[in-house]
Amino acid sequence: MNEHVLVVDDDPLIVNLFSEVLKHAGYQVEGVLSGEEAVERLNTTRFDILLADVKMPGMDGLEVLRQAKSLDPEIAAVIITGHGTLDVAIKAIQFGAEGFVLKPTEIGDLLTIVTHAVEKRRLIRENIRLKAFLPLFEVAKRLASEVDLGELNQLALDFAIRETEADGGVVLLYAESAPDRLGVAALQGMSLGMEQTITIQEPISKVLQDNMGRLLMATEGPLSPFAERNGATWELCVPLSIGNRILGVLDVWGTQRQVLTEDHLPLLSTLAGQLAVTRENALLYRHMERRVEERTRELRQAQERLLRSERLAAIGQLGTSVAHELRHPLGVMRQSVDYLSMKLADADEKVKKHLRILEQQIETSDKIITDLMDFSRVHRPTWVEVDVESLLDQTLADIEMPSLVKVVRTRAQGLPHIWADGQQLQQAFRNLIVNAYQAMPDGGILYITTTQEGEWVEIAFQDTGVGIPPADLERLFEPLFTTKERGTGLGLAICQGIVERHQGTIEVESLVGQGTTFTVRLPIMATGG
């Protein structure tokens, strides 16, 4: 029994008697001798029970009762009177009195009346508390169905402010980057300036340390700095915790004296606990969602690698078989064309034209066979020191560029040499350059740019050609996939294989109608093995 009692009577003997009796019964008691003094105490201190004499000089007991109930409707009020008239009783009941003590009175009657008033007050408070928990159940259901952390924090804060009639509040969570600071997760009705975190100070540090909510009054001690900054007169702070693990605090404050009691702590503590658990569930859900996405992506990549490996094996077997079966008849055809060209040197231009067509088609067929063989055979790089700039110059010199295509070279200053297989890189560069000018049938510009990025050398091949549709970009390096009317679809796959054997990467960016850029990244110090 810790109820706080205020006894008001202009007779010091009555005040002393009632105070001693009630203290002996376990109550905390204060006594004052006037109505004015009583109202002053009620404005600064929360009392559970009021015993007020009706007849007093100046402010009488009924006025004290009226003001007490306006400040705290839950206060249990008992009227002391030696004039038990019906009129006084009616007014006292209208103002909210729970009982009457007649002068003179028996000690037993006094205790019975006070006990009855206390029990009535407890029932009223319990009823209010139960009613307050009803909307909490609705909020809990909404919290349970919400996975957005920002919405969770704001939903809980809105409820806390509404139920306590607060002017503002904040949800603060431990900052990952600074253990001695709390980060602002939700905010309403206050300004923290540009701060996203605050230093942990009293009284919030006490709430975190004890893992227990606190109801704070400005008249009884300091409030948190940000509550005081906003002119608060009271503050209600509860921890966000799961067992002994504390995540932060839920804090609300007000500038006007509200009807706040310790009963508000269980309400907000329950809300804070629900918020903490729901946050953890939401984080777990996010984590599991990411893991599922990662695992799905890994499985998809593994499946793609398996399919690619199987496709490569099939292409390799096909390439070996085709090369064996076609190289000999193609050689015979080439010799025959050479013989006919020699014997028909004086033939008309139409015959010579068809001989040239035969020769070109034989060369095209031989190139297809060469690509198949190159693709089916995995050549381990022969590691030597290579000057990329010289290699590009040599590759360009070996290629007969169309007259409508202009090449623009941009060289990096002091580009370091790399360890690589120059012959293989030259084959990759040749394929990329040929692809570029084939993408510009009406002419254009091919930009070849070298740069150094940290421990990497980058070579970019940018054309101003027709571009590649987005749907084709993902399949561009697949063997046998081609966007050309006539092509094997092996050139880029060969390039990718060469670059990857050099522990590098090749990437492509393209816009239809504007052109395509292939970027090859090679490590300066590749390790053979």
Image (cartoon, rainbow, N blue to C red):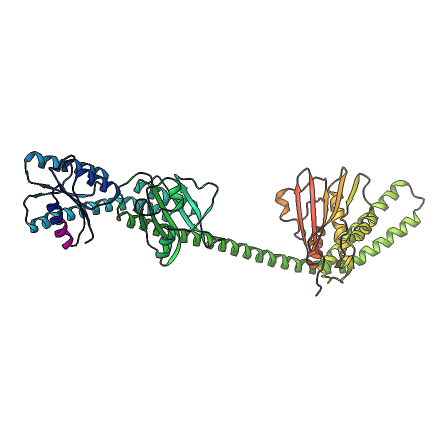
Task: Please provide percent x and percent y for residue 162.
Answer: 32, 40
- The residue shown at (37%, 59%) is 244
Image coords of residue 38 (percent x, y): 19, 41
Residue 61 vs residue 411, the one in the foreground: 61
Q: Is residue 31 magenta?
A: yes
Q: Residue shown at 41%/42% (left/top)? A: 187
Q: Magenta span has 496?
A: no
Residue 513, how many percent across, how many down?
A: 68, 37
Q: What's drawn in magenta, residue-wise? A: 18-33
The quarter of the displayed image where residue 131 is located: top left
Residue lying farthest to the right in this orientation = 346
Q: Nearer the viewer, residue 324 or 265?
A: 265
Q: Quadrant of the C terminus?
A: bottom right
Tell me which residue sits at (9%, 50%) in the image: 112
485 vs 197, left or right, is right
Q: Residue at x 59, y 55 (%)?
A: 304
Nearest the eye: 58 or 1: 58
Task: Work out whether residue 298 can be spotted.
Answer: yes
Q: Is residue 61 above or below residue 143?
A: above
Looking at the image, the residue that sits furthest to the front is: 12
